[in-house]
Image: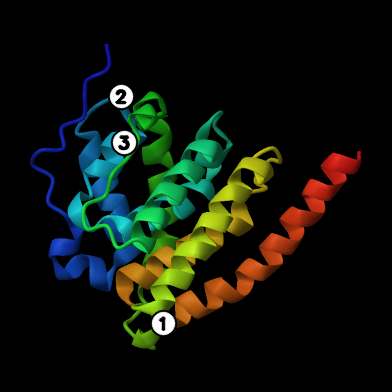
Amino acid sequence: MIDKPNTKNIPEPNGSNAQGDTPLQSVMDHIELTLDGAEAVDLKTVVEAFGNRAFGPVMVLCGLCMMTPLGMLPGIPPAFGVIVMVFAGQLLFRRKTPWMPEVLRRVKIPASKLLSVQKKVRPFLAKIDSIIRPRILWATTGPAQVVVSLFAILLSLTFFLLGLVPFGVVPSAAIVLLLGLGITARDGLLIIIGLSLSLGVFIGSGSLLIKLITG
């Protein structure tokens, strides 16, 4: 029998300086706390554990997980696509409290796979965290946030198509990760880079879709 993860006593990651200084490592720490000794955890529980300011961290989580072997598990690419779409839509309409569809409780992530991935990627995350800082703030708020939300929704749609190819979602996931990091750490440079790279992903996805339709 799988124990149900306990999220009642998990502090919100946005409530301290840790997330601003080390946003990637902070997200992984929060996931580990969410497991709380359980054999598996569902996506809705993980997302809800981030609390009321989950928009940036959840985009980081989705992008990060899709760039690891977790992204090859059945049903994971579409599920993370739904999460990004839902959160980007709520960010677009300035919703203060995140909402998640109940169906995501059906998507389980085994704790063993999650912890294994964490152990392998942490050294790389530490290096990335060391170069992230608040800058070009105009690209992180106001009208720029609307643009980020729209691009994130379009990128989430590519998860459904590119998820048919092994690791095909990695480019889209990497951009979602950049956008999430930009929102979380208020790093406008990452957002500008992410928006620029998105154009290449859209062109590639369009080409793949045309090939699938025309045979």
109 is higher (above) or lower (below) than 98: above
Closer to the chain start, of discs 2 and 3, is 2
Please state which of the two labelled residues, at mark 2 or mark 3, is closer to the viewer. 3
Give the residue type that dot 2 points to. Glu
| Label 1 element class | helix
Query: Can residue 120 be seen in the rendering of this structure?
Result: no
Q: Which residue is mark 3?
A: 44
Front one among 202 and 125 = 202
- The span from disc 2 to disc 1 (Cα, nearest Å) is 40 Å
Q: Give the residue displayed 10% in from the left and 38% down from the top.
A: 8
Q: Position of residue 83 (x, y in %)?
A: 42, 45
Which numbered circle lies on residue 139?
1
Q: Which mark is residue 39?
A: 2
Query: Is residue 82 at all visible to an observer of this figure?
Result: yes
Image location (x, y in percent) of residue 109? 40, 31
Q: CA distance from mark 2 to mark 3?
A: 16 Å
Residue at position x 53%, y 64% in the image: 151
Viewer-proximal residue among 6 and 154: 154
The amino acid type of the residue labelled 3 equals Lys
Categorize mark 2 by other alpha carbons within 10 Å: few (<14), some (14-19), many (20+).
some
Q: Secondary structure at mark 2?
A: loop
Mark 2 touching mark 1, by CB under 8 A? no
Of the numbered discs 3 and 1, the one sitting upstream in the chain is: 3
Indicate the position of residue 42 as horizontal and vertical percent values: 34, 30
Against 178, residue 215 (above or below) is: above
Closer to the camera in the image, 171 or 215 = 215
The Cα–Cα distance between marks 3 and 1, rounded to whole angstroms, is: 29 Å
| Three-letter amino acid code at the position of disc 1 | Ala
